[in-house]
Image (tube, helix red, strand yellow):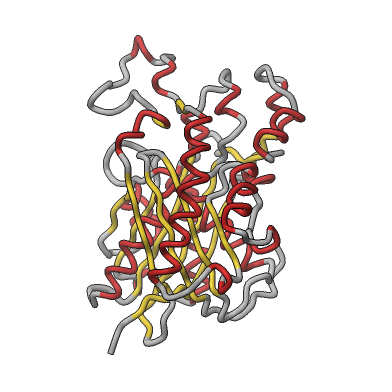
Amino acid sequence: MTTHACITGIGSYLPERILTNRDLEAMVDTSEEWIVARTGIRERRMVAEGEATSHLAVRAAEHALADAGVQPSGIDLLVLGTSSPDMIFPATACLVQEALGMTCPAYDVNAACSGFVFALHAGVTAIESGRASRVLVIGADALTRHIDFADRTTCVLFGDGAGAVVLEASDEPGVLGIVLGSDGSGAGLLKIPAGGSARPVTPGGARDASRFVQMNGNEVFRFAVNAIPTATLEALEASGHSIDDLAWLVPHQANQRILNTVEQRLGIPPERVFSHVETTGNTSAASIPLALDDLYTSGRIASGDLVALVGFGAGLTWGAAVVRWTKPRSTEEN
């Protein structure tokens, strides 16, 4: 009998602090109109002083575990997708594991904004191989810690948050197919150059621009509007479905213009493409599980719905997962 991985629990967390476009107008040469026209974003969340990626991840994980009715001790593996770890090492997943009182193996996956799909792949593989029965998969980022708020091309985009799912072994298909991809020739298009072994941060370079996110926006846009449709169609084909079978496309929430272009290229109606980028901004690896939880808690996804989760990010990386939603419709209000 084939073992499948199903999503049995989901949760998310956004920091309390809201940074609006009006706030940014007072910090950098920009305007509400320019930001909305270019990105569709009106506000985003920021971690508080003393708050880090691990804190966001713990809160999201607690919600997902409660939703699944699973105790932390019942998890066999924890995989955390992030590109803004609390520190270079240990893995942020280990900090989350300790905070939740778990004893299972825990590790990080860094595929930038594609991180949740890559982490999901690891969790699904562990279950399908029989090496785990329950896996906690988290996407969490606090990229506002790595943003130059004097650079209007990046500071308007990013926000902080976390989302998590519990995967459990099942006889019924849940996660039907996942495709992943990477193209290192585009590594220079989106990066934080300093902070690693190639360019360690020194006291004299503490304010060097190389320690902040740097992005070639035009090239990343061109990459994204090709990667998302291609990955979506490949994952659908791998799972034996077509675009017409989808109830929802849940893409990485990077930029509303990207989502609009993807809709056109896939020929999918806007009402079947979930977007809340207006209120979250680009939360990197947290983006997809945050959006999926919003879709679920607002009661817009039902058991049996076919959903595609699609991300792209620095690396360059991309990934798509086709999921048969098996949880009952939620009546919880956001």
Work out whether 92 lies above or below 330: above
Instruction: Please identify the quadrant where the C terminus is shown.
Output: bottom right
Instruction: Please identify the quadrant where the N terminus is shown.
Output: bottom left
Q: Position of residue 153 (x, y in %)?
A: 57, 25
Q: Residue at x 63, y 72 (%)?
A: 301
* Quarter of image, res 333: bottom right
Q: Residue at x 52, y 75 (%)?
A: 325
* Quarter of image, res 292: bottom right
Q: Residue at x 31, y 50 (%)?
A: 108
Work out whether 128 lies above or below 29: below
Q: Nearer the viewer, residue 231 or 324?
A: 231
Q: Is residue 29 left or right of residue 322?
A: right
Work out whether 266 lies above or below 298: above
Q: Is residue 74 left or right of residue 330?
A: left
Q: Position of residue 254 (x, y in %)?
A: 56, 43
The mark tally for this picture is 0
Q: Which residue is at the far top? A: 204
* Quarter of image, res 11: bottom right
Q: Position of residue 109 (x, y in %)?
A: 32, 50
Q: Residue at x 45, y 44 (%)?
A: 53
Work out whether 186 lies above or below 131: above
Q: Is residue 14 left or right of residue 83?
A: right
Q: Position of residue 305 (x, y in %)?
A: 57, 76
Q: Is residue 278 left or right of residue 293?
A: right
